[in-house]
Image (cartoon, rainbow, N blue to C red):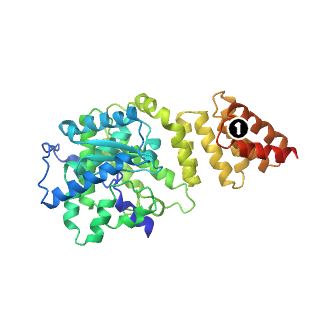
Amino acid sequence: MKRRAWLRATCAYCVVLASASWAQPDWTPPGRFTRPDLASDEGGLWALMDREEKRLRRSPFRLRDEPLNQYLLDVVCRLGGEHCPDMRVYAVRTPYFNASMAPNGMMQVWSGLLLRMDNEAQLAAVLGHEIGHFLQRHSIERLRDIKNRAAFGQFIGMFGVVGLVGQLATLASAMAYSRDQEREADRIGLVLMRRAGYDPREAAKVWGNLLDELRATPENDPAKNSVLFASHPASDERRSTLEAMAEGQQGDTRVEAYRERIAPLRRDLLDDEVKRARPNETIALMDRLLAQEPAQPDLLQARGETRRLRNDVGDPTLALNDFNAAIQSGHERVATHRSLGYLYRSLDRPIDARSAWEHYLERAPDAPDAALIQQQLQEIKS
């Protein structure tokens, strides 16, 4: 039940579209908002969100990568038009798929989302959905529906860096946009994509990729495994609906622009994904990314390390293949040799383990775990 509650705490691109929505006339955005009276319920919420934004600016989870944050703001402004001056974007290092937007214009984009986007158009699909909620004042409507202080506190908490992802289940019951609000935000998001020149067909791919990733788990039930699908059962029909709505539409995907901006962060994002300890989902994600960038050494390292840690039947051999393929590229991470040493040790191949670890220390003599690896080498030699 906690997982089912989890999604309702984070809007994170909850797609609940209806075919009729797209057939409606083009949506007209509201004018820029003025700051509400502090004595009103909306004014009080803005003040609280201002406080949360100050905390977010100081948070150790905030990614202080100015080129990245400027890039995200540029995408938001391209979608939001005249509302651009009223929106701020913060990238947050949390390895889950989520974006959210507060009524005062503060947007969070979590790093797990950034790892999963194939291009800028897919990113725009998610951010456009959040902007749709912002422009239609859905969070204000939700606030007015909340009747007790505990729920209100949870509602406020969802906008902070909940870092500790375990709290999301607790926050969940407080923040649940209605199906009509989700449908409206989805329709607006697609309109904003189209007007900004993005290919709206990419929205369906976001949905499909996430479904495929979550279905890689043994239970094969996305509703039990994801913040994204918990409150609305996932179905292939939804993906088909998105595809049908975008049929005949065209636009830019901006693949290279997206890859160029994410490239400096990707190793950290991959490390965080491996540490998330959802190996089936991670391997499905790596398989998809490697299909786009065959033999990419960072992706091979991440998949190999995930397989090594999972250690199911056949995993050691597959991990060894991944590590060796990464090394053959000539551009492997030094961490690949460390992982290879641990793998060889588990396979009772001490000579190969020693060679891998010696290579690791030669390339990274000041690594944080250098002393530990030295100890492992001494144990092998003795």
Identify the residue under disc 1: 337
Q: Residue at x 53, y 47 (%)?
A: 272
Whether residue 59 is visible here, answered yes or no, is yes
Does residue 276 sit above or below 371 in this rendering?
below
- Quadrant assignment, res 117: top left
Q: How many marks are shown on the rendered structure? A: 1
- Which quarter of the figure has residue 143? bottom left
- Would you place residue 263 above or below residue 35 in this image? above
The local secondary structure at tag 1 comes to helix
Q: Residue 56's spot in the image, x, y percent?
A: 35, 49
Give the amino acid at mark 1: His
Tell which of 346 and 27 is nearer to you: 346
Q: Where residue 87 sits: x, y (%)?
A: 25, 42
Q: Is residue 281 left or right of residue 249?
A: right
Nearest the viewer among 294 and 257 is 257
Whole-percent x and y of residue 17?
29, 53
27 left or right, relative to 114:
left
Residue 298: x %, y % from top left? 59, 36
Q: Residue at x 29, y 69 (%)?
A: 151
Q: Quadrant of residue 156?
A: bottom left
Q: Quadrant of the N terminus?
A: bottom left
Q: Is residue 48 above or below residue 289?
A: below
Is there any visible trace of residue 176 in the rendered image?
A: no
Q: Residues within 10 Å of mark 1 (few under 14, many from 20)?
A: many
Extreme bottom residue here?
A: 148
Q: Residue at x 69, y 54 (%)?
A: 311
